[in-house]
Amino acid sequence: MELNQYLEVFIEESKEHLQACNEQLLELEKNPQDLSIINEIFRSAHTLKGMSATMGYEDLASLTHQMENVLDAIRNNRLTTTPEIVDVIFMAVDHLEDMVQSIASGGDGKKDVTETVEKLKLIEKGEPLSGSAKNEVAATAVLEANQQSHYDEFELTVLKQSKEQGFGVYEIAIALREDCLLKAARVYMVFEVLEQIGEVIKANPSVEQLEEEQFDDEFTVTIVSKEEPEDIKGKIMKVSEVVKTDLRSFDFAEESNDTYGEVLANLNTQVESNTPASEQQSQSIGTEVSSVNDKKGSVKQQSNSSKTIRVNIERLDILMNLFEELVIDRGRLEQISKDLENSELTETVERMSRISGDLQNIILNMRMVQVETVFNRFPRMIRQLARDLNKKINLEVVGAETELDRTVIDEIGDPLVHLLRNSVDHGIESPEVRKAKGKNEEGTVVLRAFHSGNHVFIEIEDDGAGISRDKVLKKAISKGIITEQSAAGFTDKQAYELILSSGFSTAEKISDISGRGVGLDVVKNTIESLGGSISIDSKENEGTIFSIQLPLTLSIISVMLVEIQKEKFAIPLSSIIETAIIKDTDIMNAHNQKVIDFRGKVVPLLYLKDIFEVPSEQVDDQFHSVIIVRKGDKMAGLIVDSFIGQQEVVLKSLGNYLTNVFAISGATILGDGQVALIVDCNALIK
């Protein structure tokens, strides 16, 4: 088998399984009693192990196997989930992610994971992990509990009731031949015999493990039956390749329910859980029932889900590039048909325009990806940050199903990481401080995404300390970013946005997480390079909201074409409020700036021919064409010679030789073959 052809599928599916592990582990931490979550993690880990072994990545398979052992101990009630155990499993998942990343980058997927493997082995054996005394006791106690009793309260109750009703209760140790080739088949035959003569209450290892041949040669079964012990033994020994059957009556004194309850009660105290053992059991049973229901639901959901195929993003990029060429030609054809005024040609071109418009929507939708693909990495990050900073933080994710173009999705991850780290480090106070302020000890960070018009908004809101306007202004003055005079006229928003300046930081202590004054300026630059904008709103001691506005897509945009002398410029419609014709008499002067009164607001005027230095002859015209554009709450009027009309254009970058051209975000090719520069309105408005 040529494995390389499956490598891409292996990497993609491994990432999906690891992401599922991350998400389910976070859930498990919130609901440690929910065995259905453990089963989900186990399933993902088991599939990953199988795939890795098939592909020949032994280190990956070996670490997953060790992780699987711990998960198995938890789902079989041999271990209780503790934050320390979850930490180590997270650590193992991190290593697995590194290994998969190494394979994706052409590496061999090898990594020294001895320390993590040792920790997993210690957990599996119930031995203490260094540095976690409290839970060491808990883990050890769990092991002791299991050594003293292999049965939970429910099973013990069933066994007791069976005994009272005259059934015999037996533990049977069965051994198969060492060279037995079909162990699972023999186990099946043994169980078939046992089910004819009684009822199987428990098997050790579990039935699933027995079916998967995850045992050496021996296994134990506990049954209730009215048959004589010798008859039971004889019937089992008739199964071929069974070499030994030890049968003993169940000793209730040894497996005392009280003892088990006592141990569990001790355990619960140690792990700071107030749930009684019986409640835990009933919750566990309830969870299992709901898990079955969930599974039924998911099966139904699967059957109703639409069929999808996985397409390489590069192929979509190629398709998009070809379509961009088609859009340019479409514009050219529209221009030609307009010039020739041939009705048949005009009709054909109009039809072609409609079809290509539909095609454009389909292609753009194909490239849309849910922001969930970026958001799903943050719960894990916030958990780790909260632990590192000894804070209590609840992350709420809202609108993860909101869709954005793949190119925007790829770029937005790092800025969001910066903003979330900033909120956790600077925003949310420590539990003690929050308590002293009369707030809930647990801070809340909300990551929210939603559509509005042609934009997607992503907000990061926290209920932390907020931003101190005075502190920010003081720092900005001391760093020479602003003067004391200008600071006096700053609005709150203008003051908060100073923290986006390069090298600005109000942090008193520099930590590994933030405070070096790098980060937020990079965030601002990245978002603006995507055609978006960022704004900050804050109230001291109540919290802060970072709001990011992003375009839905970057490649094909709707613009207003305008003319300045003989040159054409494109202004994105997303920035335009409206167009107007104004008279000379409407123009006023304020602080050496020409302004107009636009619906009661004073709007500054910008002459694009002066900004872009377009050669022109002095023409005395009483009327001026103005395009009112906005950036957040700010507005400006752009003076142009004439409007041409609205058009969809393909955004092309200016290339490496024309970087940092002021107020130009790219160029496009028009239907008549001319190149039009696309105006970056955000750069014009300060």
Image (cartoon, rainbow, N blue to C red):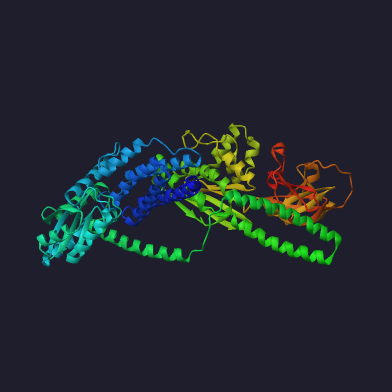
Q: Position of residue 9 (x, y in %)?
A: 49, 49
- Whether residue 600 sits left or right of residue 214 in the image: it is right
Seen from the viewer's position, the closer of residues 426 and 290 is 290
Q: Position of residue 250 (x, y in %)?
A: 12, 57
Q: What is the number of callouts on the image? A: 0
Task: Name the quarter where the C terminus is drawn.
Answer: top right
- Whether residue 568 sits left or right of residue 170 in the image: it is right
Q: Position of residue 586 (x, y in %)?
A: 81, 53
**Residue placed at 80% from the left, 54% from the top?**
643
Seen from the viewer's position, the closer of residues 538 and 530 is 530
- Whether residue 184 sits left or right of residue 161 in the image: it is right
**Residue placed at 78% from the left, 47% from the top?**
675
Can I make out residue 436 in this image?
no
Q: Position of residue 609 (x, y in %)?
A: 81, 44
**Residue placed at 41% from the left, 36% from the top?**
111
Seen from the viewer's position, the closer of residues 468 and 27 is 27
Seen from the viewer's position, the closer of residues 317 and 651 is 317
- The quadrant where residue 664 appears: top right
Can I make out residue 540 in this image?
yes
